[in-house]
Amino acid sequence: MSDTTTAGSASTVGPTAIVDEGLGNSCYLVDLGDGGALVVDPPRDLRGVRAAAHEAGLRIRFVADTHLHADFLSGAVQLAHDDGASVVASAAGCREFAHVGLDDGAEVDLGGLWLTALATPGHTDEHLSFLLSDGARPVGVFTGGSLIVGSAARTDLLGPERAEDLARSQFASLRRLSRLQADTAVWPTHGAGSFCSAPPGAERTSTIGRELATNPLLAIDDEDRFVERLLGSPGSYPHYFARLAEINRRGPSVLDTAATGRLTALPVPEVRRQCADGAFIVDVRPVSDYARAHIPGSISIPLRAQFATWLGWLVPADVPVVVVRGDDQDPADLVWRAVNIGVERLVGELHEGLAAWTAAGLPTASVGLVRPGEIDANRRVLDVRQDAEFAAGHLPGALHVELGALARDAGDLIDTPTLVTCGHGERAAGAASILERAGHHDLAVLVGGPADWAEATGRELETGS
């Protein structure tokens, strides 16, 4: 379940933030003072939202979406269906489900509190920010993917050909927001960990005054220099982003929440039949368990905060998925993370796990685990982190292929003894599984990351790309 924290604000009207650490996003629950609540940018996985509303004794009456999200499916349709909530969003988004379409300057009476729609295109064309006011007093602004703490959200998700025009729109949008009162709280959707771009380690919330003093993008008065800075190196992002905005425009299907969270138990013969028909086996156990023994050709994606991102990135969108998990891993947590990004093709899980596979006399595979001080100099080192991580420091002589690109490039790599590295080991295990599936042999995973190697050996890391 998402972590729940209270968003910082100079006002007692400040919302509760429900943070998805894996996707790097926040949604917000606002107590309207009459037993009702507003939710801003809810994900499809509403467990955190519902827990926060239940704890506060609130009924969700309004839902606001700042933009057509690309990194997760919105929970707005589900809340409208289950709770009778009224959905407000940009009229320019042309959503195909029941909602109140807002234009720039439109106001929504929440019963004492007011929302004012502010057109802030840039991250997307139809992007709105929502200014929350208590009477005539501005309290805070839900900035979605416009102004975020220490930065602004990326503008290339609609294609590289649109990136510059949208960056220029983002420049104007940030200037508009910066003219709000200095003590106005800033409540963004995207934060640290989001592939929609946020500085690592950034706080989740801020104020207009603090951003004016510390956000480097707000210090740039020249539009061309702003665009150059914003477009400089946004990094790669999961390819499933290209699908989700359109699904959000049409409206995600309503889920049976009582049934969602369960996995059908599949006997070994059925798992083998599914694989013969093209299904992928996804092994969600910890790296150490996967390394010790796993079903050959399975993809390692450990169940952790970032599970959904890598499930959507590493497994093709059109194939069924069979899960192998450990007894202590919650299937509901796995399924909800998957449906949050639109993965609804989980056909089931291997009944009784890997023990059933081995009991049937079927073969398993393994990969080595290597400690930082025990690296064989004859092994190729493959670093699968993001470009910026690699450039900041990597093992000398390491080959670099981002994990998200490895399935495409694995067939071009020479099959040679390989040690795969990332930051801690989870992405490296995923990379090793992709290489194994592509026919590579003699694979090992570094336990830890480059910093651990440098500490263990006393040697310097290489920097640069």
Image (spheres, grey):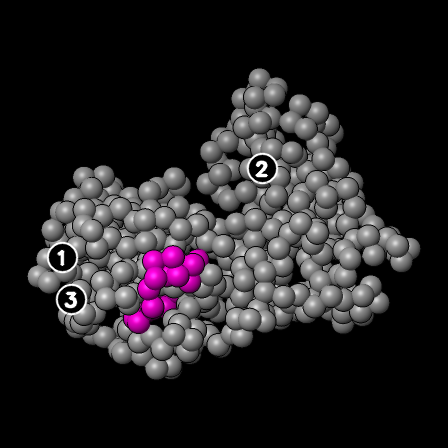
User: For the residue carrying disc 1, how many other residues have a C-alpha within 10 Å: few (<14), some (14-19), or many (20+)?
Assistant: many
- Residue at the spot of label 2: 424
The mark that comes first in sequence, 1 or 2, is 1
Q: What amino acid is found at the position of numbered circle 3 in the picture? A: Gly
* Mark 1–mark 3 distance (CA, rounded to whole Å): 13 Å
Q: In terms of secondary structure, where does tag 3 sit?
A: loop
Which residue has dot 1 on it? 138
Q: Give the image location of residue 215, x and y in percent.
A: 24, 42
* Residue 50 on the magenta span: yes
Secondary structure at numbered mark 1: strand
Reply above or below: 345 against 49.
below
Q: Label 2, label 3: how many angstroms apart (C-alpha)?
A: 49 Å
Q: Quadrant of residue 345?
A: bottom right
Q: Amino acid at mark 1?
A: Pro
Q: Mark 3 Cα within 10 Å, few/some/many (few <14, many 20+)?
A: few
Question: In the depicted view, which residue is nearer to us: 410 or 43?
Answer: 43
Residue 89 coordinates in the image, percent (x, y): 29, 72
Label 2 SS: loop
Of pointers 1 and 3, the one earlier in the residue sequence: 3
- For the record, the magenta segment spans 48-72
- Give the image location of residue 293, x and y in percent: 79, 46
Q: Amino acid at mark 2?
A: His
Image depth: mark 1 or mark 3 in front: 3
Question: Between disc 2 and disc 3, whose residue precedes?
Answer: 3
The answer to whether 117 appears left or right of 153 in the picture is left
Taking depth in this image into account, of 231 and 11 the one nearest to the observer is: 11
- What x and y, as percent, mark residue 208? 18, 48
Residue 112: mark? 3
